[in-house]
Image: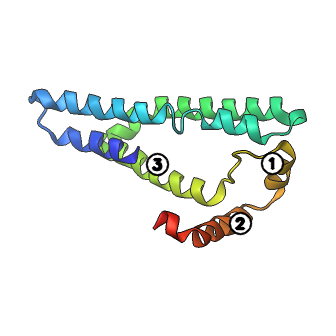
Amino acid sequence: MAWTLLAAGFSFYIPSDSPAHLGMITLFIYLFAAFYSPGEGPVPFAYSAEAFPLFHREVGMSFAVSTNLFWAAVLTVGFPKLSDVLTPTGAIGFFAALNVIAFVMIFLWVPETKQRTLEELDYICELSPNTNLLSQKADLSNSRGAYF
């Protein structure tokens, strides 16, 4: 997803009188949305639905949705000012960098919940974030042939 944002940002360097200027920006923003929608877009909702125990699920889901919508509103209101300060290329590049940082942070500190029971999820959520980091490192070293 970060590459689509970078490509959209660099598309602002195409001369604005060229027909490709607006077309390339639109294409890469569209591709970003196409990758975001089935990828990171629904994660706060799906992860919250899995991770919270039944007696806290309503509060957890409402917090996840509220946080998601709050930051979407901040982005919507703040992007024009950010674009004025950093130029459109810089603003979109900033979000591409945040995308890369988020990828690394998610990989290192968000535990895998696939095919886990609710009891196992309770145990996983009680562990410190560094425990997940160590388990990720162990998984990579045990399956080195699968990744490299």
| SS for dot 2 | helix
Q: Quadrant of the C terminus?
A: bottom left
Q: Residue at x 21, y 38 (%)?
A: 12
| SS for dot 3 | helix
Q: Residue at x 80, y 60 (%)?
A: 127
Circle nearer the viewer, 1 or 2: 1
- Residues packed near mark 3 inside 10 Å, few (<14), some (14 to 19) or many (20 plus): some
Q: Nearer the viewer, residue 90 or 10?
A: 10
**Which residue is denoted by mark 3 in the rendering?**
99
Q: Residue at x 61, y 29 (%)?
A: 69
Circle nearer the viewer, 3 or 1: 1
Q: Name the residue type under label 1.
A: Leu
Task: Give the numbered dot on residue 130.
Answer: 2
* Residue contact between numbered discs 1 and 2, judged by CB atoms under 8 Å: no
Q: Name the residue type under label 2.
A: Asn
Compare marks 1 and 2 and give the one earlier in the sequence: 1
Q: Nearer the viewer, residue 34 or 10?
A: 34
**Which residue is denoted by mark 1 in the rendering?**
121
Task: Give the numbered dot on residue 69.
Answer: none
- Residues packed near mark 1 inside 10 Å, few (<14), some (14 to 19) or many (20 plus): some
Compare marks 3 and 1 and give the one earlier in the sequence: 3
**Left or right placement of residue 46 versus residue 145 in this view:** right
Q: Nearer the viewer, residue 114 or 37?
A: 114
Q: Name the residue type under label 3.
A: Asn
CA–CA distance in space, label 2 to label 3: 21 Å
Q: Give the percent coordinates (x, y) of residue 28.
A: 30, 35
Q: Give the percent coordinates (x, y) of residue 135.
A: 69, 66
Q: Give the percent coordinates (x, y) of residue 141.
A: 59, 73
* Residue 139 sits in quarter: bottom right
> Relative to residue 136, is residue 36 depicted above or below?
above
